[in-house]
Amino acid sequence: MAYRFGPFIIAPESRELFGHGSARAIEPQVFDLLHYLVKERQRVVGSDELIAAIWNGRIVSDSAIAARISAARAAIDDDGKQQQWIKTLPRRGFRFVGTVEEILESNPAPLRESAIQDTRQRVAFCRSADGTRIAYASSGNGYPLIKAGHWLTHLEHDWTSPIWRPLLDQLNHQFQIVRYDQRGNGLSEWSTTDFSLERFVEDLEAVVDASGFELFALYGTSQGAPIATAYASRHPEKVSHLILHGGYEKGRLVRTPQSDREQGAAILTLMRHGWGKANSTFLDAFATMFIPGGSRQQIDSLVELQRRTTSPENAVAIRMAVDGFDVGDCLERIEVPTLVVHARDDGVQPLEQGYRLAAGIPGAEFLMLESRNHVILRDEPAWDVLFAALNHFVLGPPPSR
């Protein structure tokens, strides 16, 4: 039995570790340690147990164990600060965290090919109804899933991002994903001035046509949720499952609470003066709104995404547009199975907006995540809850229409 997690595969039979499509150098004892932690990932493994399993009970210093843990982390692009895969629990031991898929091990060649498939994206372009150039990318293997465009994305930057790449790796295990950059940002055309909901839906329609999918799951996050909602209300024959994560029925500028409208106007003012500037405190604060529980590396990556993905003028125009979305009249027309997901303490879109989506869509299922983050991060408990629910919802027994 081999084990796959993120872009890595551990093959115990051939005693090989593959990462990003190629074999990685790893010392035999470090391999044994990594394999043991992955195999026992459901629990914490103490130092005494590691000594018995890896060192055959010989007397080993704490520093020697720490050195081997450090080497195991380095082999899978982890470190003691991030602890993305191997987590240290003080005075208790170590645990391998994250989702692991068990796969049949035959020989290294198929495993290497499997790793390559998981870590390659194919970027292409299509044209929206008004001629705007839209960049889209496909990756993974499995059930067709289209991720609705949202603000902000960049297909190339996201592929290596410490925020988005773990999510893409997780989805690639079970789905064939198509995602795209919205008009005005990322690799899509920037020279456009129409950022209406209608144009954004047409962008999604163009990507669906380019994908060749006849039936697919549609995953809309943040501002992509109202776009996915509008699309599903128009094309129920194409959408097998609708997932709305961290979304909203009405944008900030059209909500009833005066505080929401004031917050939306304040953010737009700050964007006009702080977007795209080097060492901008606004960009740093804006990124922290999305991932208040993020590491410094993750926050810096989101700041860099903001700087690279669009112009200050487009950033303000897009933000003003999405804050004016209102899909309240679409909800009751949704005829496809729907899962609404929202973090309890989401600081970008309030929980009330998730409730409104779930209450307005006939038969919708609602999942609350215990998190402060608008973007769920791999090292928080809500990560496993999210993907277990998503996989069960889409890949479980076919829902009744």
Image (cartoon, rainbow, N blue to C red):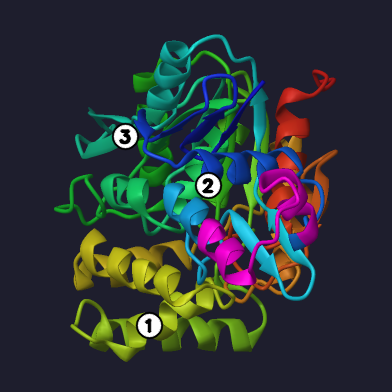
Q: Residues within 10 Å of mark 3 (few under 14, many from 20)?
A: many
Q: Which element carries disc 3, helix, strand or loop?
A: strand
The residues colored magenta run 48-69
* Horizontal arrangement in the rendering, residue 18 relative to residue 96 (left or right): left
Q: Is residue 214 above or below residue 86?
A: above
Q: Are marks 1 and 3 in contact (CB under 8 Å)?
A: no
Looking at the rendered structure, the kind of residue marked 3 is: Tyr
Q: Is residue 147 visible?
A: yes
Q: Which element carries disc 2, helix, strand or loop?
A: helix
Q: Which residue shows up at 34% across the image and 81% down it?
A: 283
Looking at the rendered structure, the kind of residue marked 2 is: Leu
Q: Nearer the viewer, residue 333 or 302?
A: 302
- For the residues labelled 1 and 3, the Cα–Cα distance comes to 28 Å
Residue matched to label 2: 167
Q: What main secondary structure does the magenta stretch of the protein show?
A: helix
Q: Position of residue 241 (x, y in %)?
A: 68, 29
Q: Point out the tag, 3 or 2, that comes first from the N-terminus.
A: 3
Looking at the rendered structure, the kind of residue marked 1 is: Asp
Q: Which element carries disc 1, helix, strand or loop?
A: helix
